Image (tube, rainbow, N blue to C red):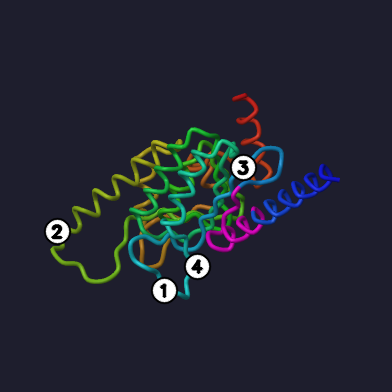
Amino acid sequence: MAKKQTKTEAQNEMTDAEVDERQLEKDVLLETGSVMKTRGKHGIHCLTIIGQVEGHTLAPQSQKTTKYEHIIPQIISIQEDPEIEGLLVVLNTVGGDVEAGLAIAELISGINKPSASLVLGGGHSIGIPLAVSADRSFIVPTATMTVHPVRHSGMMLGVPQTMSYFEKMQQRITGFVTDHSDITSKRFTELMMKTGEMVLDVGTVLDGRQAVKEGLIDELGGLSDALNYLYKEIESAR
């Protein structure tokens, strides 16, 4: 009888632990929009970057945002967690804070586990460095990516100094993108400074096929393509 009680108690404890884990995963999903670890063939962490990438300044409450203070600890946890074997970054973003976006992109590129990015809907502005930061980037045909110079809204003081700072920031973005994709610096700058395509702005809007043709994104594909890539990389590493 004692053994049966001990076994039952152990089963109940496991059940309670599973309930706690499911609740934790639910809370993380609601808070950050990310899945801690999939239950498929391999342990894949799904990291979503949606809406506006929020940096040091809070965005209006009416906007969907991805908060960098949520994303950065997740990426560090992904690197350290032995049960997570790969990272899938899903993007549908309008862009946002340049420094926050670059910080996240640098962290993703520094992970030593297989990583893949998938652009759905849009990967605009600072979303481009985020999209190319993974080992392999994918984009669906209907998605778009907007390449344009660094922009600023509001009052500017010391205009020459500010413009010099913008130019240096643009060089950081261009350097990161060209280092992590097949597009050249010259071609990326041409797309960025193109006139006549965007109303009241300079730049280029690329759809999925054009982004691949330009060498900005590695491959045209969807969710299964990105996951298959991760599975192959995980299995080949073993």
Kind of residue sitting beneath label 2: Pro
- Which of the two discs, 4 and 3, labels the residue nearer the N terminus? 3
**What is the CA distance from the residue labelled 1 to the residue labelled 3?**
32 Å
Horizontal and vertical percent for residue 197?
Answer: 43, 60
Residue under circle 1?
60
Q: Amino acid at mark 1?
A: Pro
> Which residue corresponds to the image point at 75% horizontal and 52% vertical from the top-left?
12
Reply yes or no: does residue 23 show up in magenta.
yes
**The N terminus lies in quadrant:** top right
Which SS class for mark 4?
A: loop
Q: Secondary structure at mark 1?
A: loop
Report which residue position mark 4 lands on: 64
Tag 1 near tag 4, CB within 8 Å: no
Figure check: 49 above or below 229: below
* Circles 4 and 2 in contact, beta carbons < 8 Å: no
Residue designated by label 2: 160
In the current view of this chain or complex, which residue is farthest to the front? 2
Front-lying residue, 210 or 137: 137
Residues 137 and 143: in front is 137
Alpha-carbon span between mark 2 and mark 3: 47 Å
Q: Secondary structure at mark 3?
A: strand
**How many circles with numbers are drawn on the protein?**
4
Q: Can you identify the residue that label 3 sits on?
A: 44
Q: Amino acid at mark 4?
A: Lys
